Image (spheres, grey):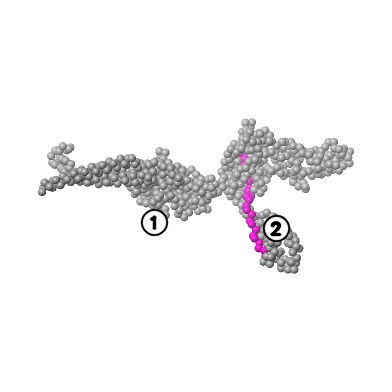
Amino acid sequence: MLWGALTNAGQAMQTMSVAMGGISDNVANVNTTGYKKVDTQFKTVLSESIRSGGVAQNSVTNASASSGLNIFSVMAASRNLISKQGTIATSDNWTDLAINGRGFFVVSHPDDAGLPQSKSITDASTLFTRAGAFQQKAVGTKSYFTTADGNYLMGMMADAQGNIPGVATSAHSTISSSTGAASAAGGSSSLTAIYTQPGQLIDGIATTAMRTGMNLPADAVATASPQTFVNTTAITDSTGGTQDLTMTWTRVDGDNWSVGFSLPTTPASGSIGAITGSPMTVTMDAFGAITSPNTSVSGTGYGDLVIDWSVGGIPASTTTPSVDLNTQKPVLKEVSVTLTVYDNAFNAETLPVAFERYGNDKWYMRLKVPSTAGTVTALSSGSAAAGGAAVPSSIPITFDGSGSIISPTSLDFGVKWTPSVTATKPAVVPVPASLAPYATSIATAVATVTAPSLPATAAQLTAYGTGLINAGNAYLAANPVFAADPVLVADLNTYGTNLVTALTTASTATSAAMATAATKAGTNTVALDTSKLTQFVGTSPTVVEIKNIEQDGYESGIMDSSSFANTGELIAHFSNGRTRTLAMLSVASFVAPDSLDPLSGTVFRYTQQAGKVTVGTIADQGSGAQIVASAVETSNVDLADEFTKMIITQKAYSMNSKVFTTADEMFQTARDLYR
């Protein structure tokens, strides 16, 4: 019928218009990140049928059936190809993310105040997208991630150690609770808006364990033993003449030497001495300084001898010379390396370590902590005494003939730290108004007295005060005008007293700061794994080659950057080189993702037709799915396909318009016949 032709053609033209609209949307969004194309399908529409009681050709029974279909038409049925992935393109923005695999980013509408909110996964304010071009938005001290529409990226926040209940994370370090970070309060697998906190602090950890991979040079110069020294001035015999005293140093162990003393057997004077007190045990510290003998009135490092000169027919006499051992002693041949240890205040402390070769495959190891930096409180191994009242200065090390260590494979040491602090500056003492005309000359006089370094001892402060008094007296003598004015003299004395008071106050403050720093730094007790220590000929006989050094300590740090891992973790990077997981991206998947409600070509809403929604991590999506950072998913529109469809749609529209105009002309002909 002509009426069917008109309606069919008209409906077809409307349908082609819908199809062309979908094509135009696709072409317009070909460069839109995460856009999902609209695919227009067509379905036949039955608008009228004529039934009769007779048997029709298309009847399946003898009952009445349609004897003919008069009017067919067509309708558009659009479908969104949401599950079809677009190409992943790299970008230079670290907050750009793409999902390689199935699943959707979960985002949430802000509340009325523009702040993030957490709703159920099926709530209308919870949306889903593949468009990962996120940007950062500051809310207080927190930096959230939002879409261009202002929706917040959702995920799971980690606790202060980087842990999320039930979720595997890779970066663990303790965040300082002093930052007041919400993420530090405890991790949760609940869905929430994720964020970073630039400038967030991370506490350090004091060193408790170290493992060193180092090579000691097998060709290093060894310390000789025995060694002989001759003292030509210490001994006076019974005739008043001097005799050479020969001192032979023989090694006992790493800290002790046996020193034997001898005199000439045929001295020129004829006075032969017999020495009592030889040999003598001499102990050295880690720096080679003598610590024993220490009972001589001459001081530490002096050996008191008793010499009997009654031999040789010379009148009997006895002398008790005190021999200075400090000036004639062996020099230890050492090669050194510097390690870093983190104290209990998480400050990096320098730990100098020296190795002395004293024989084939035999070494001594020493910790050479300067007294200004700290004190070694313990040094022990399986073959050495534990630290305590008598802490050894050295630990013996033995290698086999192939350069591998025999013992010890581990040792323990302790160091009580005394960190350096910046000295408090003395307060500026103003020159009294009465002395203003003489300020320059007074400053010159004061400058002749050197102030002690801080903190100063009481004796040093007293000496400084005395020096000012002497400088003041000299100044008065050089300036007779003061003699006639007692007020000037009194003001000058007051000025000098104030200078001493200011220096004393600064010294006290410096001492207090040092005590506080030492208390915070505390004592490190460290287990040192030496099993990877080797002895081979290296690049130089004076160099310890460091292969690697591992330890559990590190200093405090400040978060200076963040990044996303392919596991979906948001990882913070701190100035101390540590990392910590801040959050994990949540990824949602659906039974029928193409049935989601498209609020736009990039953002979708849950529908019952989409089926069960599952929220997890990208690892839960299987098939090697991963998050690609600094990348976005492009539109899944194929321009060549769209242009092909556009040509076909345009042709269909034109042909249906021709049917419409032809049917209209036929109507006019029929109308004219009626007339």
Specify few, some or many for label 1: CA neighbours under 10 Å numbering under 14, 14-19, or 20 or more.
few
Residue at the image position 28 percent from the left and 44 percent from the top: 19
Q: Quadrant of residue 237?
A: top right
**Of the numbered discs in the image, which one, if any, rests on residue 112?**
1
Going by the numbered disc 2, the residue's amino acid type is Ala
- Side of 354 where 562 appears, left or right: left
Q: Secondary structure at mark 1?
A: loop
Give 191 or 539, whichever is nearer the viewer.
Answer: 539
Give 365 or 18, whichever is nearer the viewer.
Answer: 18
Above or below residue 159? Residue 219 is above
- Side of 510 where 300 appears, left or right: right
> Can residue 143 be seen here?
yes
Above or below residue 347? Residue 537 is above
Question: Which mark sits nearer the N-terminus, 1 or 2?
Answer: 1
Q: Secondary structure at mark 2?
A: helix
Image position, residue 635 (x, y; %): 37, 43
Image position, residue 496 (x, y; %): 70, 62
Residue at the image position 68 percent from the left and 54 percent from the top: 453
- Side of 305 where 394 appears, left or right: left
Residue bearing mark 2? 447
Stretch of the chain drawn in magenta: 410-432
Image position, residue 506 (x, y; %): 65, 57
Q: Quadrant of residue 512?
A: bottom right
Residue at mark 1 to residue at mark 2: CA–CA distance: 69 Å
Residue at the image position 81 percent from the left and 39 percent from the top: 244
Going by the numbered disc 1, the residue's amino acid type is Asp
Image position, residue 590 (x, y; %): 36, 44
Q: Is residue 480 magenta?
A: no
Q: Quadrant of residue 358?
A: top right
